[in-house]
Amino acid sequence: MKSKDIRKVVLRMTHDGMSSLQIAKQLRKVVSERTVRRWQHMYRSTDTIDLKTPAGRPRIIRTKSLIRKVKNRFIYKGRQSARKLVNSRGISKGTIGRIIHEDLHLHAYRVIVESNLNDEHKQRRVSFTYWVRKFLRKKDREKILFTDEKYFELGGIFNRQNDRVYTPSRYYADEHKGTKPTAKFPKKLMVWLAASKNGLSLPIIFEPGETLTHENYIEIVLPHALSEGQRLLGDNFIYRQDNATPHKHKDLIAWIKKNFPRFIDEKKWPPNSPDLNVLDYYVWDAIGHNMHWDKVKSYDSLIDEIKKGISRVPKNDLLRSVQNWSSRIFSILKTKGAYIK
């Protein structure tokens, strides 16, 4: 029933001498007693029920003009915080919140950092998807050993948006770990790790200051990856590595071809695609969030927490992330090679 028809029914019932409560009971779930009472009062005062103007006192702050200005600010400036709008317009945070959510129906989303993919990268990703679909069956995809390297800093992980301290003032916040000292040249360690559907490998933690070269990769990483792949997935596993410069050295490729039963080489694996590596889209974050960073005071304690963080990664979540790899791969065809969130 349309609003105009409901008003006619309410008027007819009012003329028949019915009270607002009686009308609301008759029209339950259609119109409330409060609305009926307001309509009856409006009819007795003006001889009509005019809903063109809203009930209640007129708005003096949250006006159409202000709503339009806020909308234009979002259209032309894009990234805009509510705090800056409050300061620039001189109105309360609650008013801005109501304009954003109730009037404009907008929601805040975090800016996602993703790889800068050009047209060539996207085409490589699409080609890789077709190759996977043609040559890797489901049971083959479950045999992939994903590998990657990552730096862990002694200062820990800092999230400017979520790491907050609740205190009465800034002074007390500074007294209760409200500041985060950073070093110009942070102390860090490089960690190599492999992931599979059956679990994580034992990590290789390099010495402080040691970087990855094709020499130490052949001497240290590849023999370890071979033994860990056999332990986790059996003899017929598929080795995978990204397109980092040390990974493409001819001696390193020759070692892989000679010793690994199967592998995805750098010519097939698409460049600039961390969203296709289980370690990048799940494992590294899981390790970092499972470490007790307040206990990290030295390189030794950092190494100890890295090992504990690896052991705390839930096996069910790891399995789900590995199984999700196939759907991520085939999503590339839908996105035409774009980044998978």
Image (spheres, rainbow, N blue to C red):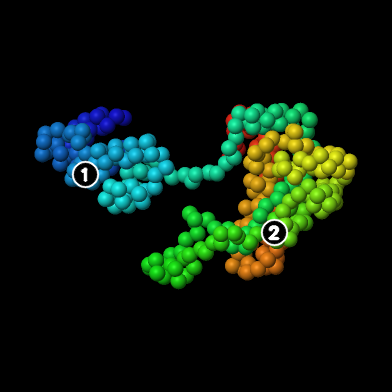
Instruction: Give the alpha-carbon distance from disc 2 to disc 1, as whole Å.
Output: 63 Å
> 179 and 330: which one is in front?
179
Image location (x, y in percent) of residue 78: 41, 39
- Relative to residue 128, is residue 86 drawn left or right? left
Name the N-terminal-most of marks 2 and 1. 1
Against 60, residue 72 (above or below) is above
Of residue 190 and residue 21, the one placed in the foreground of this image is 190
Name the residue located 23 percent from the left edge and 46 percent from the top edge.
Answer: 61
Q: Position of residue 35 (x, y in %)?
A: 24, 42
User: What amino acid type is highlighted by mark number 1?
Assistant: Arg
Q: Circle 1 is placed at which residue position? A: 59
Between 48 and 169, the residue placed more toward the observer is 169
Give the residue displayed 65% in from the left and 39% down from the top: 273
Is disc 1 surrounded by few (<14), some (14 to 19) or many (20+) residues within 10 Å?
A: few
Name the amino acid type tagged 2.
Gly
Residue at position x 76%, y 43% in the image:
247
Which disc, if any, is residue 275? Answer: none
Residue 197 appears left or right of 285: right
Residue drawn at the location 68% of the way across and 45% of the way down: 278
Note whether residue 133 is visible: no
Q: Which mark is residue 209?
A: 2
Q: Is residue 292 above or below residue 132?
A: below
